[in-house]
Image: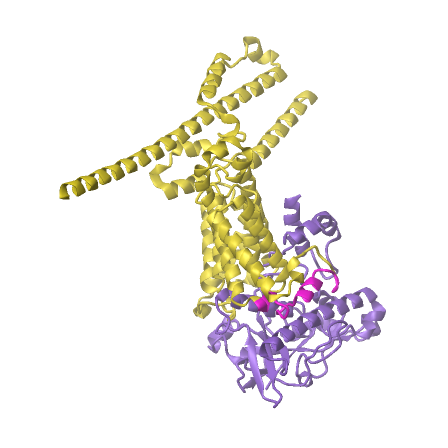
Chain colours: A purple, B yellow
Amino acid sequence: MHLWAVASPPLAFQTRGPLGGSPSVATLAAPVRGYGEFLYLNRGYAFFAPDPGPSHLIQAAYTDTTGKVDEELFPDRTRQWPRLLYHRHFMLTEFLHEIYQPPGPPPQLREVDANAARAWSAARGRYESVRQSYVNHLKSIHGESRDVAIRRIEHRIPSFVELMARPTPLSDPSLYGVLADVPIEFQNPDAGDRSTPEVLSTVGDPEVDRVNQGDVVVEAESPAASPSVEAASGNPASDNPSGESEPRDSEPSEPATSEPAMSEPENETQMLPSETRDGGAIGPTEIEGPVLQ
Amino acid sequence: MNAGALLHECRRWFDRTVDAWDHFWFTPRSPYLVSILRIAAGLFMLYSHLVLATDLEAFLGADAWINPELARSLHDGRFGSADWGRSYLWWIESPILIWLHHLVAILVTIAFTIGLLTRVTGPAAWFLQLMYLHRLTGALFGLDQIITYMAMYLSLAPCGSFFSVDARLRIRFEDKIARSARWRWFFPSQSPSVAANVATRLLQLHLCVIYLFGGLAKARGESWWDGTAMWYAVGNFEYQSLDMTWMAAYPRLFSMFTHITLFWEVFYCFLIWPRLLRPITLLLAVAVHGGIALFMGMATFGLAMICVNAIFVDPAWLKRLVHGNQTDDEADELEQIDAVGLDLDAGGLDLADVEFDEASLSDSGLGDSGLGESEVNVANVDYEAVRVKLVDRAKKVRVAGRKVRKRYLMLKEREKELARNTKELERQKRRFARRVGRDGDQSSES
């Protein structure tokens, strides 16, 4: 029974597709599910898989009563030491990205698929609760009187071709991009316009990946509060960041990738500050106001 | 082939399978290796606890990154799917209690590492680790998984047999241990045990599952096939501990590493079992995880994976490596033979009993094949009778082997005891001689 509980979670994880998990594997895994979950055997073991991808960080802005803004990037090797402590912070920022769910669900989705809409709301609620918990933690450290805002940052990895052509350090500000928190417009495939699904079928196009994710990559600031601003794009090579995939935690992203069509967000730049929008079912955000300067 | 012969073949195949199954799971194994792994797992858990202590409230406090209420709701189904991850730490918010709990966790882990009362501290250290995992959702990674699994399997084994305080206590409480089965369980002996083997096998198979699915997950990614995955791994600034971007100039190099890693991981579960391929597979494990430890900022994870791969190392070989010529090859060989559970202390085994058993065994005519001429006549072979006799003989041989082994181990124990006593005697003699010398000097001075 124990070996059954060891092998079935990664099998269930690997046999999951756009329509959900394999019914036969789910049935096979069901009897030992609770046992495996309690013993922390419910892992996918997908280290650096399917592709090693960009890192996901968070940037926090603290605004005091005079309007002065301080910024901090997590994780930070210079402040979190030893390395294991830094890595725990890194995993927290990756976790926030991993459970990200765009605001929603779109009203049309409720009509088409009520279950998917409920799952969307729950996943969004989870994301907002985690984000709020991070904000509360930072407030408890920096003082309740300060406003705290956080946003997700993606640190793109240049391809080796790119690096050879234009040698830049991996910490170059141009490689950082802000992941905005914007709603996704739902488009019913039966409604008529087929152009978007065709675009979505293109694999490996960063623009399409960006639309699929529902995140908008907007003008990036240096994580070290550098004033330089450059447009950044997503890493076309991969989308898996953390070196560890957890079956449970990857669930929220499914609605976003399995929906029939999603159109491009309307305006990329107007969404800053990235994490200031309400819209989740649970855990209303406190983050309002300050834009990271 | 007639039906009878077919049935016979099936039975033989079934018997062989059952024997192989028994051999795989229930052959007693020396707890030497699991004792070493206990130290490794304990040190990793201890390090993890100590690092957590540097910022404890940020991870476990009321205002932690993931606060206790949220940690609970991530498991109880409030956000969709519920799971059976449970931790009492979800209900602890008082900083004093958190610190006290953490202190207890550290002390228990230290006790486990040094091998003090491992029958209790082993499961306790594992349980505490599990409670932390369900509390620290979101802040975990591969290291936490692997050290928890190590602790889980080691809790099943007599991992306090070697290199432990328990081993010393066993000598000290020899009399009590000889009288009480509970004490014998509490302070496990160094003789091969089935429990050590079961724990070893479970960890080995778990490791195979980890690598198989880790490899299959990679095989779904394009970069693991086009050879660029290694570049994206070493080019990740947040992971990197040494700048390896020079590799950009050598695509052949990093693509080769990528392909080797992928194939090694997918096929690990097959390559690790044959004795011939095992060293190569383990060397690759050291290379891959050593690379992660050195270049990708996960020294603890890389080292933990190297340590856990040692579960495939033969304890006898390891013992020879550590102790050199002091270890008797023959004894190691004997530890590997197929014998049922043996505890020298159990039942107050006496050398005279063993000798008597051996004598009666020789009287039973073990050397005789037991097959008459008519039975070996090919034309009239009674397969069933031959089979029964052979099975009977095999049993006798096994019993004889077991008894010889018992006697051998008993003699070894006596030899060790004698050596210990001789050493002690020598020490006392020297001490006495020194004292006599000192007294003589004092009297001559006075």
Where does the image place residue B339, in percent across and percent down from the top left? 52, 29
Q: Is residue B275 visible?
A: yes
Q: Is residue A178 above or below residue A256?
A: below
Q: Is residue A72 above or below residue B53?
A: below
Magenta residues (range): B57-80
Q: Quick one: which residue is furthest to the right in this view?
A: A111
Magenta includes B58? Answer: yes
Residue B55 shown left or right of residue B427 in the figure = right
Where does the image place residue A73, in percent across and percent down from the top left? 55, 77
Q: Quick one: which residue is furthest to the front in this view?
A: B446
Where does the image place residue A230, in percent across and percent down from the top left? 57, 84
Identify the residue at image location x=62%, y=73%.
A137
Residue A283 shown left or right of residue A87 in the figure = right
Q: Quadrant of the N terminus of chain B?
A: top right
Q: Is residue B277 visible?
A: no
Residue B342 shown left or right of residue A17 in the figure = left
Q: Is residue A195 above or below residue B47?
A: below
Q: Quadrant of the C terminus of chain B?
A: top left
Q: Hey, which quadrant is residue A46 in on the image? A: bottom right
Where does the image place residue A225, in percent across and percent down from the top left? 54, 83
Q: Hey, which quadrant is residue B224 in on the image? A: bottom right
Identify the residue at image location x=59%, y=29%.
B16
Observer-nearest residue: B419 or B356?
Answer: B419
Magenta includes A102? Answer: no
Observer-nearest residue: A94 or B284?
Answer: A94
Q: Quick one: which residue is furthest to the bottom in this view?
A: A66
Observer-nearest residue: B154 or A278?
Answer: B154
Observer-nearest residue: B97 or B78?
Answer: B97
